[in-house]
Image (spheres, helix red, strand yellow):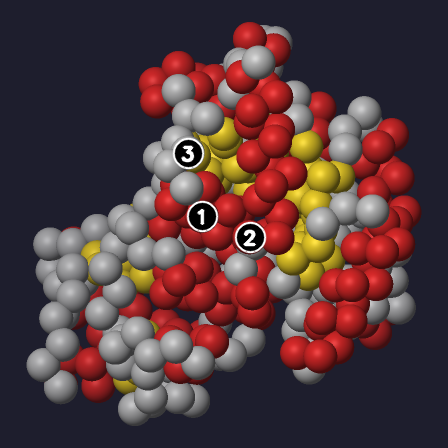
Amino acid sequence: MLDQNHAKTTHGLLRNPKRFMIQAVIDPKFGGKDAGEILDGINRNIPVYNSVQDFVNQGGKAEYCIIGVATEGGFLPPPMKADIISALKHNMSIINGLHEFLNDDRELKRLADENGVLIHDIRKPRPKSELAFWTGEIFNVKQTKIAVLGMDCAMGKRTTANMLANELIKRSYKAEMIFTGQTGWMEGWHYGFILDTTTNDFVSGELEHAIVSCAKEVSPDIMIIEGQSGLRNFSGPCGSELLLSGDLDGVVLQYAPNRKYFIDFESQGLEIPTLKSEMDLIGMYGKQVIAITLYTEGLTPEEARQWRQKYQDELGVPVALPLEEGVERILPVIENLIKTKKT
């Protein structure tokens, strides 16, 4: 599964480990190989094991076992339960980002208690008494706010947001990523919330609270907000909250030229809208797409470069290939926004 979109949590932790130091990946398909080489051809000295028991048998020790998949419906795949049991028996706490709460599984909860470890169901909704309602305080935030929105799920939005924030930091800007999903928290970013576990009435408020808190506490030059799903994704439309309630200064729009249908709905023929129509829709919200980033699954390097040039010529905004070439091509327009906001 390491080579599939559903392993995007693992991909994020391999690329951007901050909260956790990743020692190994469990995937029987690639046992014995290096996880980084499977991900993007870069050796990260992170071995892949066939099972948790295999990891332990070869002298491996870990404090946490992280469930690094995003499954359809958010349920624990039955074949993975044996690895969770093995991890608990070897005194590893579980970091669970699925919608299924493992503390509700009597066997797993018993094993956790017996071995003195914890199961962290990080998608468990917080009490409403702890949630913030939107107030309009967002309009007092003076720092630049950019969201990375996408046309579908599993299209690389969080990866691009990470890359933008980290590259701006390298250029001596104070940059923060506002996470909106469980993986962003796992990666170690400090401000954000898990959108799809938040009661609908409080989504805008939690977004505002994260941005306002970040602005007050660390006063960054720019906040890069992680998008979720897509504005017109039938199974989970998302994005208008960020555009409106987040009072954005600009949008970086992620698109996959080779993906015709919404992921998991290919058989139903649910087509992803055109890039130009999505830019027009965002414009109707009063926001501007300042750059395009391309997720190049299924494309050769030459095809990817051709699409990049085509969109840049047609749409009049800079276009980047984050995984192949980084995000440098779109940084000038972002830096210009930062300077403009400061004047």
Look at mark 1 in the image and give the residue it sits on.
167
Look at mark 3 in the image and give the residue it sits on.
173
The answer to whether marks 3 and 2 mark residues whose Cβ atoms lie closer than 8 Å is no
Name the element at disc 1.
Answer: helix
| Residue 164 is at least partly visible in this image | yes
Look at mark 2 in the image and give the residue it sits on.
328
> In the rendered image, which quarter is residue 303 located in?
bottom right
- Within 10 Å of the Cα at label 1, are there few (<14), some (14-19), or many (20+) other Cα atoms? some
Q: Along the line of sight, which residue is nearer the eye, 4 or 16? A: 16
The answer to whether marks 2 and 1 mark residues whose Cβ atoms lie closer than 8 Å is yes
Image quadrant for the C terminus?
Answer: top right
Q: Which residue is drawn at 16% across and 60% down?
A: 63
Q: Provide residue 211's location: percent of width, then percent of height.
A: 49, 24
> Mark 1: which amino acid?
Glu
> In the rendered image, which quarter is residue 269 located in?
bottom right
Spatial separation of the CA atoms under disc 3 and disc 1? 9 Å
- Within 10 Å of the Cα at label 3, are there few (<14), some (14-19), or many (20+) other Cα atoms? some
For marks 2 and 1, the one nearer the N-term is: 1
Q: Along the line of sight, which residue is nearer the eye, 15 or 169? A: 169
Name the element at disc 2.
Answer: helix
Q: Along the line of sight, which residue is nearer the eye, 264 or 333? A: 333
Q: Provide residue 23's location: percent of width, then percent of height.
A: 22, 70
Image check: 102 left or right of 116? right
For marks 3 and 1, the one nearer the N-term is: 1
> Mark 2: which amino acid?
Glu
